[in-house]
Image (spheres, grey):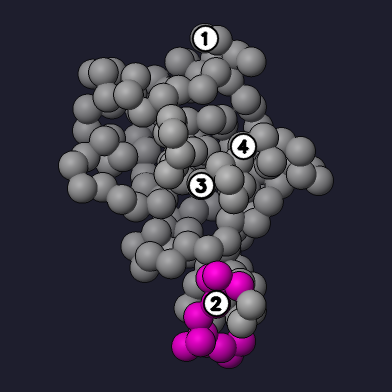
Amino acid sequence: MRYWLMKSEPDEVSFDDVLAAPKQTVAWYGVRNYQARNFMRDGMSVGDGILFYHSSCAVPGVAGIAEVASSPYPDATQFDAASHYHDPKATQENPRWISVDVRALEAGRFLPLTEMRGIAALDDMVLLQKGSRLSISPVTAAQWNAIVKLLREGKR
């Protein structure tokens, strides 16, 4: 089992949106970074743990615990000319972008980025490295355990 941090802008898809979705599952679409795409395509497996992270908002941070709920498949938004995520170079025969389904598992307390920066066990976390902007990044088992423990301390 692997662990991942996946960033979503809460005004597009929040953790509460996932909790309210049928089967508490949504497609993770719109990734347009090759390294993040490769993590989904080559690294993720059904059942892997996800720290669902709210980004590009007033208070960024981990909003909940989720899991990978599907194998990778072509991201449908790349083919939709009306979509913000349309890619005119992508074809049905040669898709460029990948989606996976994400299932919400648990809403703990919100863990702000500012608090994460003060936790020694997270010092080497990809998210906290200077210049890190990836929407998907690997998380070690130790980082996962430290964050999940904090999320469960003040469960909402």
Q: Earlier in the sequence, mark 1 or mark 3?
A: 3
Q: Could you tell me how far apart the alpha carbons at marks 4 and 1 are, in whole angstroms?
A: 18 Å
Q: Secondary structure at mark 3?
A: strand
Tag 1 and tag 3, C-beta contact below 8 Å: no
Q: Could you tell me how far apart the alpha carbons at marks 1 and 3 are, in whole angstroms?
A: 23 Å
Rendered image: mark on residue 130: none
Is 89 included in the stretch rendered in magenta?
Answer: yes
Who's the residue at 60% across and 14% down the image? 155
Q: Which residue is mark 1?
A: 153
Q: Which residues are magenta?
A: 83-94
Who's the residue at 22% across and 27% down the image? 123
Quarter of the figure with residue 118: top left
Rendered image: mark on residue 86: 2
Rendered image: mark on residue 15: 4
Q: Earlier in the sequence, mark 3 or mark 4?
A: 3
**Which is closer to the viewer, label 1 or label 3?**
3
Q: Earlier in the sequence, mark 1 or mark 2?
A: 2
Q: Could you tell me how far apart the alpha carbons at marks 2 and 3 are, in whole angstroms?
A: 18 Å
Q: Earlier in the sequence, mark 2 or mark 3?
A: 3
Q: Earlier in the sequence, mark 4 or mark 1?
A: 4
Tag 3 and tag 4, C-beta contact below 8 Å: yes
Who's the residue at 61% across and 37% down the image? 15
- Other residues around mark 1 within 10 Å, as few (<14) / some (14–19) / many (≥20): few
Left or right: 142 as drawn, with respect to 43 = left
Q: How far across and down, in percent of the image, does residue 96 sit? A: 48, 78
Q: Could you tell me how far apart the alpha carbons at marks 2 and 4 are, in whole angstroms?
A: 24 Å
Q: Is residue 21 above or below residue 140?
A: below
Q: Which residue is mark 3?
A: 8
